[in-house]
Image (cartoon, grey):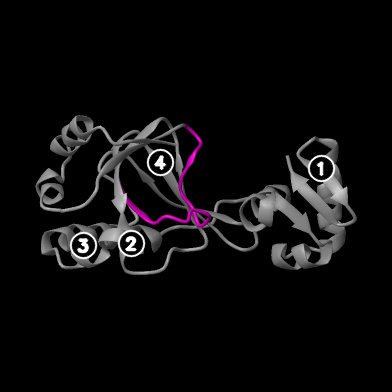
Amino acid sequence: MKRIYDKKKIEACIAGSKYHAVLDSLDVDFCLIEYEKGELVSSPFQNETLFQIVEQGSINIYFIRDDGTRYSLSNGTADYFLGDMDIFYPKSNNIYAEAVESLTCISFSVEKHREMLLSNNKFLELICNSLSVKMGTMTTIEAAPASLTERVMSYMKYKCDNETLKGIEQAAFHLHCSARQLQRILNQSETAGLVKKLGKGTYRLM
């Protein structure tokens, strides 16, 4: 992730945005953020809450359940909003946005400017439209088919501290499988070089 504070570049991006009229009315500290392919643009692990508009590139937004099941929520390209729900609600612990390719976003802090944003009717109109479209999309989503191995890998990556699974019985409960099934998956994954055993019942994702 790279932040750009060059005023001329920021002004050029805002001028070329579909939402330039509304953005020009906001008294916020804009910056541009560039992401590399595969980098997380938004995740529960990020401390800072940002409102971001995709200026160039594309993203995948997905939801990870506690059992490692992955739901594809949306695909975003130019003019897509990130952080719109965070203006009203606490950040979700399960939603991720990932750069599909090199990505540039127009960004600013939600926390720093929340009161001003909530008092700007034009901005709120854009947010309401964005959320309505997203809610409509979410009513049609289904869980992507996944093998137990795929769910174990997702569980370790997104639900375990430091991508480290500790305790076979507890993890098996969350994954809705038997401890024996989980142990077999972990043994196979260790042989394949996907995980490393750190101790009894403790495995780290490689």
Q: Earlier in the sequence, mark 1 or mark 4?
A: 4
Q: Earlier in the sequence, mark 1 or mark 3?
A: 3
Residue 130 location in percent, x, y?
25, 57
Q: Are marks 1 and 4 in contact (CB under 8 Å)?
A: no
Neighbor class of circle 1 (other Cα within 10 Å; few <14, some 14-19, many 20+) is some
Residue 155's tag is none
Residue tagged 3: 117
Q: What amino acid is labelled 1 in the image?
A: Lys
Q: Which residues are magenta?
A: 37-52
Q: Are marks 4 and 2 in contact (CB under 8 Å)?
A: no
Q: Earlier in the sequence, mark 4 or mark 3?
A: 4
Residue 113 location in percent, x, y?
25, 60
Q: Earlier in the sequence, mark 3 or mark 2?
A: 2
Residue tagged 2: 111
- Residue 179 is left or right of residue 90, and the answer is right
**Front position in the image: 114 or 39:** 114
Q: Residue at x 77, y 63 (%)?
A: 172
